[in-house]
Amino acid sequence: MEIIYYLVPMAMIIVAGIVAGLFWAVKSGQFDDMEGPAHQILMDEEIFPEDSENKEFNKENNNE
């Protein structure tokens, strides 16, 4: 029975830590955009746009 005197406060401390972590995550914006990263992986867009040097090089090579 004495073990309950240790387990109950320890459980309350763990729950308080979990709740504090949840509030921190919400406050820091971890749950702002839940669907964006999931949809971003499906989009077929160039990650790095072509710079002007590559465009000029491609135009010169295509004209030949």
Image (tube, rainbow, N blue to C red):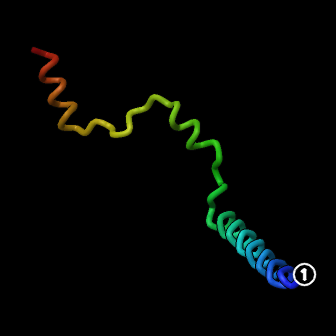
Q: Residue furthest right?
A: 1
- Check disc 1 and report the residue beneath it: 1
Of 22 and 33, which appears nearest the observer?
A: 22
Three-letter amino acid code at disc 1?
Answer: Met
Indicate whether 61 appears above or below 30: above
Numbered disc total: 1
Q: Quick one: quadrant of the C terminus?
A: top left
Residue ID at (12%, 21%): 61
Q: Is residue 21 left or right of residue 51?
A: right
Element marked by disc 1: loop
Indicate whether 61 appears above or below 10: above
Q: Residue furthest front?
A: 1
Residue ID at (65%, 65%): 25
Q: Quick one: quadrant of the N terminus?
A: bottom right
Residue 29 occupies quadrant? bottom right
Residue ID at (83%, 81%): 3
Where is residue 5? Give x, y as percent: 85, 84
Where is residue 24? Give x, y as percent: 66, 70
Where is residue 22? Give x, y as percent: 71, 66
Residue ID at (18%, 25%): 58
Residue 35 occupies quadrant? top right
Of 18 and 38, which appears nearest the observer?
A: 18
Of 62 and 1, which appears nearest the observer?
A: 1
